[in-house]
Amino acid sequence: MRWSLAVVVSIGLLMGFDASPATASPAGDGAFCINGFNYDGGLGDCSYSSYAQCQASASGTANACLANPYYHAKVETEPGQERPRRRRN
């Protein structure tokens, strides 16, 4: 009896865990988000790479564009160039 209870509890715990990682960023990974009446709170749709692109989609609606606070620009350095190192005194 105890063994079956332990098995049922273990299965329940394993099924309760979600295997997918949690993401902090909203839908899309663009630099700008459209937000407003058509979106239920949050940042809305963040799939726009430019402000003009977002404004074109928001034009004529009750929506607005804002910068995505979770956006991190990918800066690529030229091959062979390293970041200058600081010298310790």
Image: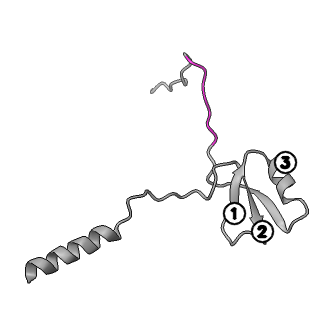
How far is the residue under mark 1 from the one under mark 2?
Answer: 8 Å
Identify the mark nearer the N-term, 2 or 3: 2
Circle 2 SS class: strand
Q: Position of residue 11 (x, y in %)?
A: 24, 71
Q: Is residue 52 magenta?
A: no
Q: What residue type is labelled 1?
A: Gly
User: Mark number for residue 12?
Assistant: none
Please report the residue visible at 87 percent of the width from the left and 66 percent of the height from the top.
Answer: 61
What secondary structure characterizes most of the magenta part?
Answer: loop
Left or right: 39 in relation to 83: right
Residue visible at 86% across and 53% down in the picture: 56
Q: Do the residues labelled 1 and 2 touch (CB within 8 Å)?
A: yes
User: Which residue lies at the image location 69% right of the left edge and 63% below the top edge?
Assistant: 44
| Residue 40 on image: x %, y % | 69, 72
Say the numbered circle drawn on residue 52: 3
Q: Mark 1 points at which residue?
A: 44
Residue designated by label 2: 36
Q: Mark 2 to mark 3: distance in Å? A: 17 Å
Q: Report the residue that reaches farthest toward the right.
A: 60
**Element under disc 3:** helix
**Mark 1 nearby-residue class (10 Å; few <14, some 14–19, many ≥20):** many
Give the spatial CA distance, label 3 vs label 1: 17 Å
Q: Which amino acid does label 2 sit on?
A: Gly
Which residue is most to the bottom? 1
Q: Which residue lies furthest to the top in this view?
A: 80
The image quadrant of residue 17 is: bottom left
Span highlighted in magenta in the image: 73-79
